[in-house]
Amino acid sequence: MTAPTGPTETGDIADFEQEFSSAGTPGRTPLVIKLLVAATFVVILNETTLVNAVPTLMSDFKITESTAQWALTVFMLTMAAVIPVTGWFLQRVTTRTAYATAMITFSTGTLIAAIAPTFGFLLVGRVVQAGGTAVMMPLLMTTLMTVVAAQDRGRVMGQVTLAMSCAPAMGPAVSGVLLELGSWRFIFVAVLPIAILVGLFGFRQLENVGETTSSPVSWTSVVLAAGGFSSFVFGLSKVGNAEWPLPTALIGGGVVLIAAFAVLQLRLQRLERPLMDLRTLRHRNYTVSLVLMSAGFMAFLGSMILLPLYLQNLRGLTELQTGLLVMPGGLAMGLLGPQVGKAYDRIGARPLVIPGAVAMVALLFGMSRIGVDTPYAAILALHVALMVSLAMIFTPVFTIGLGDLSPQLYSHGSSLLGTLQQVSGAIGTALLVVIMTNRTESLAADGVNDADAFMGGLQWAFFAGAVIGVVVIAMALLLPSKANAPEGAHGGH
């Protein structure tokens, strides 16, 4: 979606002008954003709903735990492979077409998964679901940057945080309740009608935003991006779970393909037809935001996988109990997002991001001090406070980073942002799990009992998350208070 310099493909100039006049109304969220946030919430919720279903999948399909984990892994791999293509895709099609494509694809995948007769069919359904999910986040971000006035973007971006943080946090708790009521299929059966209704209502109400462009696709770029990012993320997911030659080969091969992809994009930029436009990286605020966000997601997602391991493996909680314990943190982060966004519109990024980053490091350090008998109330308080600190970071950073780009780069900037979220999350998860595992094995070899050895490994991993968080503080100090309004950006004058 490029700069809104003329009518949409429908040719309805009146609708176009009405859309932008309402979009620029201070204090109001355009309908198109509300619809996209609702759809994004539905598709992202699905990303974590199968976390609790692994034991029942093992039982129903007579498969091992490592095989059942593919129902989760394949979703992440598909996201990593598809998101790099979305920048080009969103520039070629209208808002309504992109929305319809995403929701039809997601709903089709949900149906395939619900009726899957074999585990292979379930994996196919998850791949199709992830393909639809991969389009929604960049579509939401790109549309937001196009239709929302610059002075109001923080508040609206805060509503996006609601979908991004509440949905993953609620996924395990929702699936825990559904698994109490029925089989793993009930998770997909419950989601399908909601996805269809949201898709139909959204398509009827949506209006096209901006113009489309028609640039040829570089299929070599598609293959390099899909192969490179998915191999890299898959290699990271196998760290600690497979013999070392395999993860090393996958990670190394992924890095080579990603490097080749980047070189090819630089060449295609001269022809004005890159799949992912890397000229976004010439914008200082965007690049600083990208590094900050990547480090933040490494610490955030890496740490978030540690807490359930502690609660289930050491404290003996069920999946449902664990989901309910971590859900308040996700809700706090999501519900605080709009308020943080409003504060950003008033006071800028630095007064929010710098204290948030310092608090995040302090809280991760605090989590590195928990023990085998730490009260659940203390764990809950630490987790909620950590999620609040992350809300202070992510909403302003997303806003200031994308706000630094010119309109024709919004879709490419959103695509690169989404890709690095997947990659940095995978890096953080792999790194902290390896640190935990190695420290646990070292303590066990020294004769420490299993519970204390596991606790020692967990403490080291949380401390490593705090160390990664120092990068977030350093990048926060480089942020300006407000984004520079690029020439031609809507609402930026």
Image (cartoon, rainbow, N blue to C red):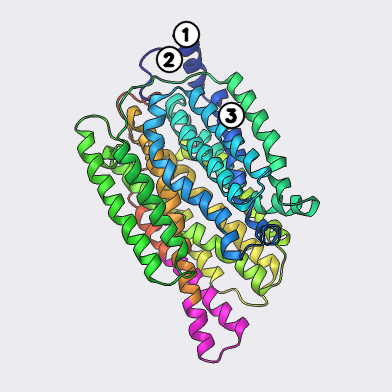
Tell me if I can see residue 469 in this picture.
no
Q: Which mark is residue 8?
A: 2
253 sits to left or right of 415? left
In the image, farthest residue toward the bottom: 447
Under mark 3, the amino acid is: Lys
Number of residues whose C-alpha sits closer than 10 Å to that of mark 2, classed few (under 14), some (14–19) or many (20 or more): some
Helix or strand or loop: what does disc 2 sit on? loop
Q: Which numbered disc, 3 or 2, marks the residue closer to the eye? A: 2
Q: Are marks 3 and 2 in contact (CB under 8 Å)?
A: no
**Pick the front one: 444 or 295:** 444
Residue visible at 46% across and 55% down in the picture: 425
Residue visible at 65% across and 72% down in the picture: 313
Range of residues picked out in magenta: 438-467
In the image, farthest residue toward the front: 117
Residue labelled with disc 3: 34
Please tell me in which quadrant of the rendered image residue 481 appears.
Answer: top left
* The C terminus - image quarter: top left
Tell me if I can see residue 134 in this picture.
yes
Residue labelled with disc 1: 12
Under mark 2, the amino acid is: Thr
110 sits to left or right of 231? right
Of the numbered discs 3 and 2, the one sitting upstream in the chain is 2
Could you give the CA–CA distance between mark 3 and mark 2, rounded to whole angstroms?
20 Å
Reply above or below: 28 against 376: above
Estimate the x, y position of residue 178 in percent, counting from the top left: 75, 50
Q: Is residue 16 magenta?
A: no
Of the numbered discs 3 and 1, the one sitting upstream in the chain is 1
101 sits to left or right of 228? right
* The N terminus - image quarter: top left
Residue visible at 48% across and 54% down in the picture: 356
Reply above or below: 4 against 348: above
Q: Are marks 1 and 2 in contact (CB under 8 Å)?
A: yes
